[in-house]
Amino acid sequence: MSYDERVNAHPNLGDESDVEEEALVNDYREQVNFDDGMSELDRTTSLGAASQTQDLQAQLAAAATPLEYQATLETKFASYDNYCSLFHYILNSDGPVELEVPSYYWAWDVIDEFIYQFESFCRYRNRVARSGSNEEEAQLLRENPNTWGCYSVLNVLYSLIQKSQINEQLAAMKRGEDSAAFAGEYGSRPLYKMLGYFSIIGLLRVHCLLGDFSLALKTLDDIEMNKKAMFARVMAAHFTTYYYVGFSYMMMRRYGDAIRMFSHILVYVSRTKNFQKGGNSYDAIAKKNDQMYALIAICVALHPTRLDDTIHSALREKYGEQLIRLQHGGPEALPLFEELFRSACPKFISPTPPDFDNPALNVDPVDHHTAIFMDEVKNTLYNPTIRSYLKLYTTMDLKKLAGFLEVEPEKLRSWLLINKQRSRQVRWVENGLLDGESVSANDLDYALEKDLIHVSETKAGRRLVDWYLRNLARVY
Amino acid sequence: MGVAFDRCDTRPANIDAILSGLDRYNPETTTVFQDYVVQQCEDRTFDCYANLALLKLYQFNPHLLQPETVTNVLVKALTVFPSPAFSLCLALLPAYTQPFPASEADAQSAQSSDFVESVQKLARLSSLLESAQYAQFWSTLNSDDLYADLVADVAGFEELVRIRIAVEVGKAFREINAEVLEQWLDVRNRESLEKFVTEVCSWEVDNSGDNTIIRVPTNKENEARSEVKSERVGMDMFGRVIRRGFEQAA
């Protein structure tokens, strides 16, 4: 199925989502007017809650607040302890904790900050070991191997998910049943429900950071990827989800699906741009925005696709010249692929403490994943060349084409096989994100009869239904 | 034809239970997964999703890592090319393995252990298969005894790869010269080649001309027919229009 056909198959998406999008935009405007979660928190506490709740509120507030950029190692340890005691209180008290969440995005902020601190701690630890310069810090880190350990972080996320029975609730919602019936004692409370829900998104992110891309996608089995999903109510969560899902697809070589994910969120962002300017997460979103355009550029180069008009023009604006070089392929494009990948990939981490005694053994996980990705790019480097030539012919002699390209016929045969293989891709149709059908993703196809290449092109027919529906919607 | 990545027809129920629960993180299940890898090596099945779970356990508990099991998982992943399986496995290995060293010098310095060297050697094989350089793949495989050791545990490794190559050839070719196929499949003897293509692939051999030609019957992939794709019209597309009709009538 070509991309066109895909759009064609769901023309109603365009209209329906417009309405939903308006609602979301309004939603977002409200959120921005509330400025941020902190003022909300102040308001609830000043309403005269019991002092114990106030302490807890302070702890909750701290959990959602980013550490200072130059925080010392001690602060990081203390912050970890703070999270531990907070989550311990929430998860292991006698029965559910009585607490009203200030807002939707408070729960997101906590989970987001929790994972961010885990990520930056792991990266910092790795860096200390790699540089071997700060003996004092290295010693401190060596003595505390379990601080910000991967097992404790995953334990928190999974416990929140299980306590809230959020997966059962989501599955019920998917079946069209009342989720409250499956929520249980904990899950019926907003605090647990929200923490549980965003823990799923948190897991997606953690798995992706650890390089487990298939498990990352599997985590989202019960979440439906559409604008009605709960994550869509928090801009940063919406954004994060699509970034990591898209990236995971990309690493599983499902470029079509990756492009679909990135495009979806980028179109949404471009429509809500005016409201984000005032928000405090604007910078972070703007950065991720650029990263996703870079990833789309890579995906489109590896897997030519017709993009949404908005995306296409924005892409040309941001990466115009680079995009042309990427699409041209060949060895000259390699450094550019690498540069863009590095600038746009998540900050991969290694879950275990590094080897402080052998600095050379501690390779940056980002280098590791970049090298793996670049191997695939190298293997498929000549696909654009092949395609551009074959487009010109209906039949062509292999040896003659090899002459044009100045390569050995043997090499050209390999290139033809590679291009053929890479034009078949798994693409999502329904069910879980890991599900999919193998489809031909290219409008150019060919077969070899000995050394004669027969080329065929698939053309898209006229699309009438879409046209009719649009006009029907207009007049009636 | 759905191909969900997390499913596998040959996966036993107990493995499935571990994979869908939190036991997949339990270091004690490592041995279960290791046994499962041994089983896959013996009965020629492949379960990528389960093997990734094992590699994840190794990632979290480096002291449990068994180099032979890791290399066996990688060798198994080689037998399903072209697919992202191999690179997904690499992604979970410790970064110090540096599967694709930037230069020869890097490779030399990084080869501090046999394990690292094995991973790098297998990564090289993977690149050759993924880039369809089959003749080089066989010559590399046969160039060093270390490769023979690495693939020794995987029953029928060469045959599995040969079949994969044949499948890929079948998708792209309608006719192919026997000489080319000989090199790609590393079958040096014309008789064995003819036996392989007729018995395993059910292709035809044409000896009438000067050169022997292997004919691949037409299949969905190698017919390369020009077609005009027409649109798909489904009831769901009209949902909105129909709904509106009802709304206005009311």
Image: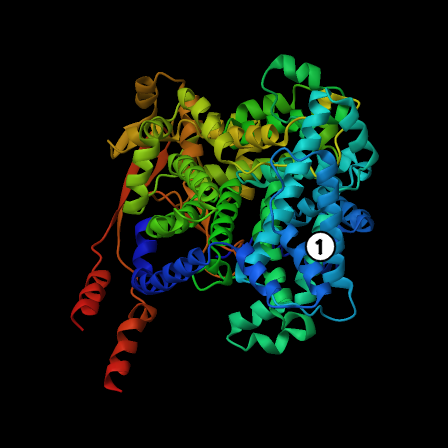
Give the total of numbered labels: 1
- What's the colour scheme? rainbow
Question: What quarter of the picture does the C terminus of chain A occupy?
Answer: bottom left
Which residue sits furthest bottom? B250
Q: Is residue A451 left or right of residue A232?
A: left
The foreground one among A292 and A444 is A292
Q: Quadrant of residue A391?
A: top left
Instruction: Classify mark 1: residues with Cα within 10 Å, few (<14), some (14-19) or many (20+).
Output: some
Residue at horizontal 71 percent and vertical 47 percent from the top: B43
On the image, the x and y values in percent for residue A111 come to 62, 52
Q: Nearer the viewer, residue B196 or B235?
A: B235
Would residue B216 be visible to someone looking at this image? no
In the image, A420 versus A432, the foreground residue is A432
Above or below residue B192? Residue A22 is below
Q: Residue furthest left?
A: A475
Q: Residue type at mark 1: give it.
A: Val
Q: Give percent across and percent down for residue A194.
A: 59, 63
What residue do we see at 74% from left, 22% from top? A134
Mark 1 element type = helix
Residue B118 vertical position relative to residue A73 in the rendered view, above or below: above
Residue carrying label 1: A156
